[in-house]
Image: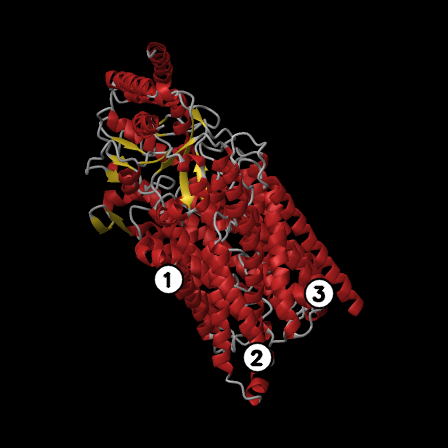
């Protein structure tokens, strides 16, 4: 099951490493990571980055892997503090395709490695695997990267096995914006891709833009009566208060029949560690319905 | 006249019928139908009862409430431009709710409406306190209101940015969505609306008297201020309830009373009935159209943005037809500003001050260990980061300062500026068109699009103003309408949530963070290429404020002069907004600061304004880097956080009232 993926990844990593600048071959001493997905992947490879972005939010929303206190916080992902980055003076800066526009500024500090995971219309999981392998290669952690790819794939396969009784059950994975709107994760999001990998079906089949659709009214959840609903935390405070009294919410078949779960926050634009976390949280939530229904 | 009124009443009847037809279509689509696979009747009934019906009810009630609030505010402030959004009430309510959500969640849980009311009252209190001494003169009130609104919006945006999942919040925030899942918003809006209608009818006589001037009202024995405050409080209550329940919905409060008057509602009693009805029809129809345009994946445009999209053009069309109160001309008051006999000696300290600001911003900074003054090798390392962004901020600020001087002198209006007249937003519309055609378009194409947009916006404003002989008030109102129209376009594009949205969001917030030396050179060349010609033709700028007749008799080639000035201004504004966004309001305050120093001649005024613009923008950039270190705020946002309160203060002092 996992062998073909690994082989494909290794091939991709060989291609990517051929494209890297020569001086990166020696593993860098100090890495700064702008992209959250790559930050968690770096940590999962056992490397302590020197700097990352929006660490306050990272600790709340990404949760695992845990961040060491010594990492410097570079500020907002969209406008990182270049002065501070210059003072940290890393040997390598890791970004994703979202931050290509910062490349010119970042390259004044150190060589930049850009690893795309989220591209409109593409399932992100294979890209996350390729990114992990390429990152392991750049950081001199080739074996750890291969292990991360294989472990995650094995874990997802185990989860799929657990969920076999629920095969093809449609599930909405959503994020509530206020008490009246939600955002659905489509096929090109990690949540959507993970549903497919777990043998479930994504109930949200409409087109999405950049992984999650623009806010939609909650009545849209009624369109697939047999679907289950997974709400990804965090919930805005007034939502937690008003949702219990929301007549429409309570009338949804999924809510009436107890096929609703609120799961802990997961990085929307994460790498393999987030994918693994998502697989675990989705499996925990879904096996609950399996037992009840 | 009576015939015209009948025709117009029929027109409103038709529009109401259209809204009703759209509603019937929604009801038919949601009617419980056992044939729909998988959906049981209960769920279908719940959807009909808890989403379709309350949505129509909220549209009608909120529209009526905004129409009534607008009418009351316009009446007691004797100001046809007053409404919840132009007075900063909605923005104040939003900011209060944002602050409460973050720092006092218990207050939000207790009563969202009370928090919104507190914010709205505070905003309108600031506006009224500051313009009180000017007798609540309409344009000052609206300008103070816009400044308060702008500052509140910038504050809300800063809070969102500094605290979390900013994109999702912004998508819903800007819009004003009428999506419903229960009757509670409708139930919350109904009491203030009913109370308001009854109270207004009971206060018909005092309200009629308040429409007269103060002296007559006092002679008729009215406790003028108490009544006025009472009515304002009532209007704020109505408006903030709507803001708390469905978000910001602009223009209904402005358009409904004006349309009521144009439709022939002469007496106050007639208008008290007509304005809420027209407001209800406007919002109901707009919301029906929004739902008609919605696809399976959700609505393309939030209703609040759609009302601005429809209301902007409507207001532009209305302007020449709107009867305004006659107030002392603004331009006359402005001409009396103190004039320095030795402008050269004034410019020197201004220049020194600007250089000091640059030095502080270059040398003083923070690192994780704390504050420090950079020297030696550390400075040379930081130099390459600080110099480009500071130089870019200074150049952009200088450009906006110059554009402000030209626009103020060309229109003879001390309250005009590229931001107020919607020229900056026009640049954004041009930029939007370019990136929608090809989002990989380079900086050159983006700039070309912005310049074209700014040029067309400015030309449209000035042409409309010239053809219908606008006074300064209408010119400003046309600018407000233009900005609102464009920002509705921005909201719509941003809510698409694609690559273009991110470019536009970055442009709107205005960030110098990624400044590069090529950009700096481009900005400096642009500044020089536009300001040197302006200095060369500064005589035009001295003559133009004196009026067309004087200008002609002095042999000024009017048409040619205007065309040259408009082109240069469009180029400057578009260039500056590429780097610091459209909403800095530096173009408004820099010319003011220069004039306050006594720089009255066009040439010195121009130079002084460029220096002030550069200084304020550099200080903004420094603050944007320092306030939440290591988190950096966008400089455009900080510039408006500085200039908004300053301008409000200036209005309160009465800048153009005495010399």
Q: Is B419 left, or right, of A261 in this rendering? A: right
CA separation in Å, label 3 and label 1: 55 Å
Residue hosting label 3: B263
Residue hosting label 1: B353
Upstream in the sequence, badge 3 or badge 1? 3
> Do pointers 2 and 3 mark residues of a single chain?
yes
* Chain containing the residue with disc 1: B
Upstream in the sequence, badge 1 or badge 2? 2
Number of the front mark, 3 or 1: 3
CA separation in Å, label 1 and label 2: 47 Å
**Residue toward you, B520 or B9:** B9
**Residue toward you, B646 or A185:** A185
Upstream in the sequence, badge 2 or badge 3? 2
CA separation in Å, label 2 and label 3: 22 Å
Query: Quarter holding the N terminus of chain B?
Result: bottom right
Number of the front mark, 1 or 2: 2
Residue hosting label 2: B210
**Residue toward you, B159 or A109:** B159
């Amino acid at each position: 099951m996992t062998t073909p993926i690994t082989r494909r990844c290794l091939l991709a990593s060989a291609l990517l490493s051929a494209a890297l600048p020569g001086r990166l071959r020696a593993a860098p001493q100090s890495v700064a990571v702008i992209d959250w997905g790559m930050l968690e992947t770096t940590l999962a490879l056992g490397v302590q980055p020197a700097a990352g972005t929006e660490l306050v939010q990272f600790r709340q929303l990404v949760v695992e892997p845990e961040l060491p206190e010594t990492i410097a916080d570079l500020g907002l992902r969209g406008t990182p503090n270049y002065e501070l980055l210059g003072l940290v003076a890393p040997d390598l800066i890791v970004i994703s395709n979202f931050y290509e526009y910062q490349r010119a500024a970042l390259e004044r500090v150190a060589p930049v490695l850009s690893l795309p995971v989220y591209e409109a219309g593409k399932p992100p999981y294979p890209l996350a695997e390729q990114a992990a392998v390429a990152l392991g290669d750049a950081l001199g952690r080739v074996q750890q990267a291969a292990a991360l790819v294989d472990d995650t794939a094995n874990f997802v396969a185990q989860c799929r096995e657990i969920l076999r009784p629920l095969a093809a059950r449609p599930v909405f994975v959503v994020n509530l914006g206020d008490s009246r709107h939600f955002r659905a994760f489509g096929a090109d999001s990690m949540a959507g891709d993970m549903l497919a990998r777990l043998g479930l079906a994504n109930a949200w089949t409409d087109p999405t833009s950049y992984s999650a659709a623009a806010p939609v009214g909650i009545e849209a959840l009624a369109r697939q009566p047999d679907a289950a609903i997974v709400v990804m935390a965090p919930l805005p405070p007034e939502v937690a208060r008003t949702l219990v009294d929301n007549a429409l919410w309570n009338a949804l078949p999924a809510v009436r029949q107890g096929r609703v779960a609120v799961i802990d926050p997961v990085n929307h634009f994460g790498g393999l560690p987030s994918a693994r976390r998502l697989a675990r949280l989705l499996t925990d939530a879904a096996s609950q319905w399996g037992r009840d229904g | 006249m009576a015939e015209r009124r009948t025709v117009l009443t029929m027109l409103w009847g038709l529009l109401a019928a259209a809204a009703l037809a759209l509603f019937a279509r929604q009801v038919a689509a949601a009617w419980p139908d056992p044939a729909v696979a998988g959906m049981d009747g209960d769920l279908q009934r719940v959807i009909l009862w808890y989403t379709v019906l309350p949505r129509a009810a909220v549209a009608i009630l909120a529209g009526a409430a905004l129409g009534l609030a607008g009418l009351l505010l316009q009446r007691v402030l004797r100001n046809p431009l007053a409404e919840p959004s132009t007075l900063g009430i909605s923005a104040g309510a939003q900011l209060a709710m944002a602050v409460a959500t973050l720092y006092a969640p218990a207050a939000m849980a207790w009563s969202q409406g009370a928090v919104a009311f507190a914010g709205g009252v505070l905003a309108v209190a600031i506006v009224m306190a500051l313009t009180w001494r000017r007798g609540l003169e309409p344009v000052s009130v609206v300008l103070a209101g816009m400044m308060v609104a702008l500052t509140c919006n910038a504050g809300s945006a800063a809070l969102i940015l500094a605290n979390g999942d900013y994109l999702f919040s912004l998508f819903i925030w800007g819009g004003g969505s009428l999506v419903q899942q229960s009757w509670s918003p409708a139930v919350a809006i109904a009491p203030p609306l009913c109370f308001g209608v009854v109270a207004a009818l009971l206060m018909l006589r005092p309200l009629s008297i308040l429409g007269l001037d103060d002296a007559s009202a006092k002679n008729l024995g009215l406790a003028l201020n108490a009544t006025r405050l009472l009515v304002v409080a009532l209007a704020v209550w109505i408006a903030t309830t709507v803001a708390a329940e469905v978000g910001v919905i602009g223009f209904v409060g402005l358009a409904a009373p004006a349309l009521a008057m144009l439709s022939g509602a002469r007496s106050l009693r007639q208008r008290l009935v007509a304005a809420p009805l027209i407001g209800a029809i406007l919002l109901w129809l707009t919301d029906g159209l929004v739902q008609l345009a919605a696809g399976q994946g959700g609505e393309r445009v939030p209703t609040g943005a759609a009302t601005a999209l429809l209301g902007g053009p409507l207001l532009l069309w209305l302007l020449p037809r709107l009867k305004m109160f006659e107030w002392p001309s603004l331009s006359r008051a402005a001409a009396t500003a103190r004039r320095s006999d030795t402008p050269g000696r004034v410019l020197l300290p201004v220049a020194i001050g600007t250089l000091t600001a640059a030095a502080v911003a270059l040398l003083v900074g923070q690192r994780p260990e704390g504050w420090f003054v950079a020297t030696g090798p550390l400075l040379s390392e930081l130099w390459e980061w600080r110099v480009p962004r500071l130089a870019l901020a200074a150049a952009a600020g200088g450009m906006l300062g110059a554009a402000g001087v030209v626009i103020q002198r060309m229109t003879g209006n001390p309250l005009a500026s590229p931001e107020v007249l919607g020229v900056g937003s026009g640049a954004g519309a041009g930029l939007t068109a370019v990136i929608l055609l090809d989002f990989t378009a380079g900086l050159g194409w983006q700039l070309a699009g912005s310049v074209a947009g700014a040029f067309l916006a400015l030309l449209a404003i000035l042409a409309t103003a010239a053809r219908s002989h606008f006074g300064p008030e209408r010119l400003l109102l046309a600018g407000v309408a233009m900005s609102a129209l464009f920002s509705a376009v921005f909201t719509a594009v941003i809510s698409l949530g694609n690559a273009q949205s991110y470019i536009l969001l970055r442009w709107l917030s205005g960030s110098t963070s990624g400044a590069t030396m090529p950009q700096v050179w481009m900005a400096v060349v642009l500044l020089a290429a536009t300001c040197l010609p302006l200095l060369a033709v500064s005589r035009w700028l001295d003559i133009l404020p004196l009026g067309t007749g004087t200008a002609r008799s002095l042999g000024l080639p009017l048409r040619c002069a205007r065309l040259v000035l408009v082109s240069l201004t469009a180029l400057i504004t578009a260039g500056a907004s590429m780097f610091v966004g459209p909403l800095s309001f530096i173009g408004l305050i820099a010319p003011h600061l220069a004039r306050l120093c006594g720089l009255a001649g066009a040439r010195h005024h121009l130079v002084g304004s460029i220096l002030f613009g550069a200084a304020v923008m550099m200080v903004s950039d420094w603050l944007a880097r320092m306030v939440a270190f290591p988190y950096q705020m966008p400089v455009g946002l900080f510039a408006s956080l500085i200039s908004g309160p300053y301008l409000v203060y200036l209005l309160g002092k009465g800048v153009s009232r005495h010399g």
